[in-house]
Image: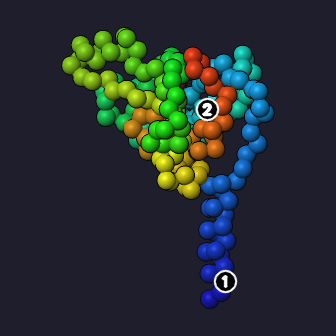
Amino acid sequence: MRYPISLVLLLIAAVIAYAHWPLEGLPEGVTANRVVVLKSERRLQLYRGETLLREYRVSLGFNPVGTKEIEGDGKTPEGSYVIDKRNPKSQYHLSLHISYPTAEQVTKAKVKGVNPGGLIMIHGIRNGLGAIGRLHLLTDWTAGCVAVTNEDIEEIWRVVPNGTPIEIKA
C-alpha cells in the first residue's frame, strides 16, 4: 500500500516542480524593441533587432483559431499592433495593453453591426491564483488576451516599453 501513496506524492511533487521551476531570466538593462506572438505555437517572443532575446509559452483566448472580430468570441486578435499602455493594478498580475482594435477593424465591425471588442492584454494569472504557475498553460482560457506566468509578465513588463510593436500571427 505504501508504494501507491509514494507514487502519488512523487507525482504531486513533480507537478509542483513543473509549475514553479525557475527559468533563467534576461539580464537587467536589456530592452526589447519587438514582440511576436505565434498563436499556433503558443509562443511569445521578444526581440532586439533580429536577435531573439527570450521566448515564453502562452495561453490564448478560449477559442483561439482565427482572428478576433467580435467582442466575446474568445479569439486572440491577429495583426500588427503596439504595446500602448500598462496597468499595474489589473485583475491579472500586471498587464500590457495591445492597441487592438485598429481603426480599420473598428470600421469593419461597424459595417457588420458588431462590437470588435477591446482590452486585449498580455498579462499574468488572475490575482489570487498565481500559485498555479505554468499549469495555466495546459489550456487556452482567456477572453482573447495573451497570458503568461506571473514571473514571465514581470520580466516582460520590465523589458518591453510602451510603444513597442507587437505582431500577432496565426
Residue 156 place in picture, x, y as percent? 63, 33
Q: Residue at x 46, y 34 (%)?
A: 145
Q: Secondary structure at mark 2?
A: helix
Disc nearer the start of the sequence (1/2)? 1
Which residue is the site of mark 1?
3
Q: Residue at x 57, y 20 (%)?
A: 162
Q: Secondary structure at mark 1?
A: helix
Q: Residues within 10 Å of mark 1 (few under 14, many from 20)?
A: few
Residue 88 place in picture, x, y as percent? 53, 35
Q: Nearer the viewer, residue 28 or 98?
A: 28
Residue 24 place in picture, x, y as percent? 76, 42
Q: Nearer the viewer, residue 152 or 51?
A: 152
Q: Residue at x 37, y 26 (%)?
A: 118
Residues marked 1 and 2 touching at CB (< 8 Å)? no
Total marks in image: 2
Q: Residue at x 62, y 22 (%)?
A: 161
Question: Of the residues shown, which amino acid type is indicated by label 1?
Answer: Tyr
Question: Of the residues shown, which amino acid type is indicated by label 2?
Answer: Trp
Q: Residues within 10 Å of mark 2 (few under 14, many from 20)?
A: some
Q: Specify whether 129 is left or right of 46.
A: left
Can see residue 76?
A: no
Which residue is the site of mark 2?
157
Residue 154 is drawn in which quadrant? top right
